[in-house]
Image (cartoon, rainbow, N blue to C red):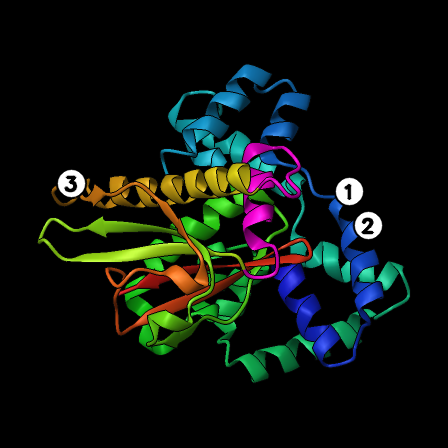
Amino acid sequence: MIAQILGKYFVEKDFLTHGQLSTVLKKQMGRKVRLGTIAVSEGLMTLAQADAVNMLQQSIDKPFGDLAVYKGFLTITQVKSLLREQGNEFILFMQTLNDEGLMDVPAFESAVRQFQIDSGVTTTTLEAMKAGSIDAIIETCLGDNMSEFIDHVGTAIRLVVRIIDRDAYIGKARITNDVSELPSGVFQRITTPSGDSYCCALTDEKQGLCAVASGFAKDQFENDDLFIIDAAGEFLNCVNGLFCTTVSHEEPSYDIEPQQFYSHENIPDTITGSKILHMPIYIGSSVTEFVIIK
């Protein structure tokens, strides 16, 4: 994710063109390997075990390595060794830019420093982002007045990366206050143990629902709106189900209503809120927004 975020910034600053960034990311993709794939190739896990951990991640919000240790498939030492082999995305991005003759290391480091200044990112957070921390990236993309959303957004983004597209990335979040301006999307209401309720949604920005549906169902959808809505809605259900299950370890259970699709013109009056978080998620050339309405 750090490569896509930095790459987008580099294009905006004219350090790279869209075409150059696309080439670099494609070449870098071939160098990134999932932890489970490495473990299977080295005979540390069976394919069935890796698949079991991948499935478990849909109900327990933990990294692959942590769950593999929990299941007894790997030791902590083995996970640390595999993580070193997996490669650091930040370093791979820098090396690929250098290999392609687009940006040498000093120029890259200078551009990253400028990114840090423009984004207001602390050195500690930047180092965590370099190390691949999704939580640090989410913290950077959320504003100071958005801390109440961080856990729910974190669950959504981690599932997008794990299930939809490992190269998906996020942009700067924003807050609005007018429900009538929301685009079409799939919506789901959640009621807390205290009786308060709020809505979450995935909106159809720039073919966003189609990208979510295709990634979730592992199938290519084009113009079949029903399948797109069903698959995208089921993914939203997974996000909210996992979030509520995680929170419910500490509190009584939450109530989740069935997800519904609403067009921009037909969002019902029952969906209300004065604080609306929009978190843009880039999946390939498509964009969706994870929205929380409170």
> Which numbered disc, 1 or 3, marks the residue closer to the eye?
3
- Image quadrant holding the C terminus, namely bottom left
The local crowd at label 3, few if under 14, some if 14 to 19, many if 20 or more residues have their Cα within 10 Å, is some
> Upstream in the sequence, badge 1 or badge 3?
1
Instruction: Check the image and report above or below for 1 versus 112.
Output: above
Identify the amino acid type marked 2.
Answer: Lys
The local crowd at label 1, few if under 14, some if 14 to 19, many if 20 or more residues have their Cα within 10 Å, is few
**Res 61 visible:** no
Judging by the rendered image, the residue that carries numbered circle 3 is 253
Instruction: Check the image and report above or below for 156 versus 124.
Output: above
**Res 30 visible:** yes
Question: How many numbered marks have been drawn onto this rendered protein structure?
Answer: 3
Q: Are marks 1 and 3 in contact (CB under 8 Å)?
A: no
Q: Are marks 2 and 1 in contact (CB under 8 Å)?
A: yes
> Which numbered disc, 2 or 3, marks the residue closer to the eye?
3
In the image: residue 117, left or right of residue 265? right
Q: Position of residue 87 (x, y in %)?
A: 67, 46
Q: Are marks 2 and 3 in contact (CB under 8 Å)?
A: no
Residue at position x 91%, y 66% in the image: 101
Residue 143: assigned label: none
Residue 27: assigned label: 2
- Image quadrant holding the N terminus, namely bottom right
Instruction: Check the image and report above or below for 274 versus 64.
Output: below
Q: Position of residue 233 (x, y in %)?
A: 43, 42
**Magenta range:** 205-224
Front position in the image: 86 or 164: 164
Mark 2 falls on what kind of element?
A: helix
**Distance of label 1 from label 3 (alpha carbons):** 42 Å
Residue at position x 37%, y 71% in the image: 180
Residue 30: assigned label: 1
Q: Is residue 216 magenta?
A: yes
